[in-house]
Image (spheres, grey):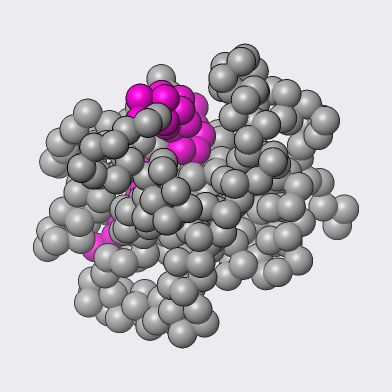
Amino acid sequence: MPKWMRSSEFVSLAINERVARVALNHPARRNALSWDMLLEMRSALLEADDLKSVSVIVLEGAGKDFCAGYDMHSAYARYADEAGDVGAYRTGNGSFDDDAWKLERFQELMRTAFAIHKPVIAKVHGHCLAGGTDLALYCDMVIAADDARIGFPATRAMGSPPNHMWFYNVGPQWAKRLLLSGDLIAGRDAAKIGLVVASVPPERLEEEVASLAQRLATIDPELLATNKRIVNIALELAGAGTLARLAAEMDSRAHLTRAKKEFDADVAELGFKEAVRRRDEPFGDGVVKPTW
């Protein structure tokens, strides 16, 4: 049992043997990312980074999935409520710039795992989709279950990854292969292309993550920070920060496409779940199966 634990509405934080566990804890919605959940996650990550009793952080999801993406049900409800809003504050739904502004505010929260000093390991099981991949790829290492399903199917009709760490993990060809199609990749194959650092059978996932976390926890946290931050500086020098800013604007551009307008019309007529089914139906199981 953890030596110390606290929970908020959507996120829990537990600490044991110098390892902090930050868990997305809304399994009824498959840990879909709302603004409130991201605020709570950021607070938990910052607290773990601040605590002297913590050397390494594991980011995980409660229930059957790591994270099924952004919380689009609440997002579409908010869009409807904000339609025609002429209040004093931006809605994030009025213009290209409003949309980019909103996405940049989300970026600040999503980027927390990348920005803090202590290493963060993402423990991925079940679905890791869309915003879930944004979150996982901002972590320092990702370990996945062999049968985890990872991808960004929203690129088929809804937009583009608004954070876009794909290029830095798998290079241009695999980034295009996955994002142009919206296809998913299993954890075992994600390890083959470098999208995750390791994959193991589902029953061994906790053991594998805990083993790596404990290995890192034996090292001076200031040395861990030194080595994390120099690699992240290399990513910044390679344009990761600039690309993230441009990714938000490209996602805003994608929201103006015919495909997005048609998808939104399907949502209005059929509901979000049926609109997604119609979007994905032509792709079959939609899973990339590398031939090697």
The answer to whether residue 264 is magenta is: no
Q: Position of residue 252 (x, y in %)?
A: 52, 52
The answer to whether residue 59 is magenta is: yes
| Residue sticking out furthest to the top | 270
Residue 15 visible somewhere in the drawing? yes
Q: How many marks?
A: 0
Q: Quadrant of residue 119?
A: bottom left
Residue 31 visible somewhere in the drawing? no
Q: Indicate whether 104 appears above or below 27.
A: below
Q: Where, quadrant-wise, is the N terminus in this rendering? A: top left
The residue stretch that appears in magenta: 55-82
Q: Position of residue 208 (x, y in %)?
A: 48, 50
Q: Where, quadrant-wise, is the C terminus in this rendering? A: bottom right
Q: Indicate whether 156 appears above or below 98.
A: above
> Residue shown at 87%/53% (left/top)?
291
| Residue sticking out furthest to the right | 291
Q: Indicate whether 40 appears above or below 113.
A: above
Between 144 and 69, the residue placed more toward the observer is: 69
Q: Position of residue 91 (x, y in %)?
A: 33, 41
Between 45 and 2, the residue placed more toward the observer is: 45
Q: Quadrant of residue 2?
A: top left
In the image: residue 4, left or right of residue 278: left
Q: Indicate whether 162 appears above or below 225.
A: above
> Residue shown at 81%/46% (left/top)?
289
In the image: residue 260, left or right of residue 203: right
> Residue shown at 63%/35% (left/top)?
261
In the image: residue 122, left or right of residue 147: left
Between 89 and 281, the residue placed more toward the observer is: 89
> Residue shown at 49%/45% (left/top)?
131
Between 147 and 285, the residue placed more toward the observer is: 285
